[in-house]
Image (spheres, rainbow, N blue to C red):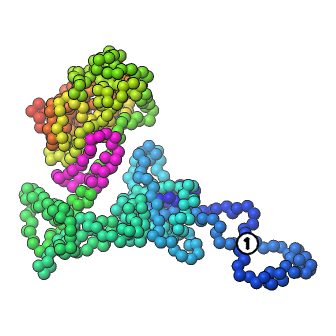
Amino acid sequence: MAAAGAEARGGEGWRAAPHAVPRPPGKFPGPRKRGRDARADRSATRRDAASRAADTAAPRRAPPAPPWPWPRPRPLTLLATRPARCPQSPPAPGPCEVRPARPAPGPPPSRPAAIPRTRRPGPGCRSRPRPLPARQLCEGIRAAREAPCAARADSCAARAWCVPCLVSLDTLQELSRKEKLTCKSIGITKRNLNNYEVEYLCDYKVVKDMEYYLVKWKGWPDSTNTWEPLQNLKCPLLLQQFFNDKHNYLSQVQKGKAVTLKENHSSLQPAIAEYIVRKAKQRIALQRWQDELNRRKNHKGMIFVENTVDLEGPPLDFYYINEYRPAPGISLVNEATFGCSCTDCFFEKCCPAEAGVLLAYNKNQQIKIPPGTPIYECNSRCQCGPDCPNRIVQKGTQYSLCIFRTSNGCGWGVKTLVKIKRMTFVMEYVGEVITSEEAERRGQLYDNKGITYLFDLDYESDEFTVDAARYGNVSHFVNHSCDPNLQVFNVFIDNLDTRLPRIALFSTRTIHAGEELTFDYQMKGSGDISSDSIDHSPAKKRVRTVCRCGAVTCRGYLN
């Protein structure tokens, strides 16, 4: 949403800054004459000299203020919350402007009550967002209703202060419909303002041999939920999900050897209904996260998300990126200094030959070099086209992958939805590039939490490390295995700095659809096992993470 006026700083929450608009130079133009008698005009001009002298000697008063001659600056209409991230964090969702469904007739309304400001976090802030109370949020929407027409506010949109809205889409839609407001940015228009669509089913009961379902309407608050007869529901998929969630809950209760719930055919017990609602909300959240991941990716393969194990939702502190994100103080020069002029990179002296290594791929786009050998692909300065056989990693993932919740306690994992041939490129490992000293500090924190996301870039030296804990792509969710089906290779494309290779994961064997993808967390780019995995000396006081890969050759620990 946009808020006209100066930038608001400090305080608790955002409020509409008072607008001190300067008057234009000169006098205000007097009101236009309408329907006045001509004789009255002539008599007004025939004044005697004494009257003129008296008027000249008397002090003049300022003329009455006329109607506003230009568009009045629009007050703040933001449903604002406390900023969630500091300047180094990724930007929040874009601004959204709530417009009134119908402009109020009559004179220009008075400015609405000010919404409290919010305090801007400092550079090192990592606090969570704290939403404003619903009462203050509603005041923001009421301010939009009392604001001037949207057409009059368009002229001051260029100088408006845009504030990112951190309220969820559901909350915005519910409050907009409650206050009868329209907003195209959140999908509320005059046409669908009063539409009712089933979002999910909450409960079930039988009254006089007639089945009823408690319906949650999409974009409406929970207070508008209604009991609807089965004959009025035209949503077979939601009905099937309702019964599947009910069956899964009863199965988990029996499997956990808890107190068996007596199934009542006339109504659901509160515990069952609560689980069904939480599962429905989780399903919606995962679908939105899946859509966000596919909007951010830059490769061909699609990303899917599923969780049929527990009620865990999307990670709260993870941001999808497609390439390395350098930490402050680290510079990545992604511009090659030379390139090849080949017409056929298979038979001419290409980039790998210039670097003193062999071409990494065969004509089937499969890797043919042993682990530990670097891959030099054609870069942006090469004269070969995008169909060059030496451009594989830079094209990104070509397979559709699924982020799923594992049932063996390993959290999230990644599985392939299609068959992957052996020795083919699967994905790239990206994250935040940090120094080795910072990696040691973070490594101790990660060990205490039992997580591992650090990958040392030790092809030539051990100066930098990739941390995929907060920033990463699909590889962030790939689990460890002591018998993996993915192999690590160092890749150089536009950045030829040997201290900063790109990390590519290739399949070591044929991977069938539905099989989980894994790689060895202790595997270096050289193909060797890191010495940290076999160092069992008591002098090294580190919290060791137990391995749950279940392989026959399992080493027992991740670090």
Q: In this view, does 118 lie above or below 546?
A: below
76 or 457, nearer to the observer: 76
Q: In which quarter of the image is residue 516?
A: top left
Q: Is residue 105 above or below residue 288?
A: below
Q: Residue at position x 11%, y 35% from top?
A: 551
**Which stretch appears magenta?**
285-313
All told, the count of numbered labels is 1
Q: In which quarter of the image is residue 331?
A: top left
Disc 1, SS: loop
Q: In this view, does 215 lie to the left or right of 14?
A: left
Residue 544 locus on image (x, y percent): 21, 35
Identity, as a three-letter code, of the amino acid under mark 1: Gly
Q: In this view, does 354 lie above or below 400?
A: above
Q: Residue at position x 27%, y 72% from top?
A: 225
Residue 308 locus on image (x, y percent): 17, 52
Residue 432 locus on image (x, y percent): 36, 36
Residue that mark 1 sits on = 30
31 or 502, nearer to the observer: 31
Q: Is residue 465 visible?
A: no
Q: In this view, does 273 lie above or below 509?
A: below
Is residue 270 on the magenta stretch? no
Q: How crowded is mark 1: few (under 14 residues within 10 Å), some or many (20 or more)?
A: few
Is residue 287 on the magenta stretch? yes
Q: Residue at position x 41%, y 71% from top?
A: 180
Q: Quadrant of residue 302?
A: top left
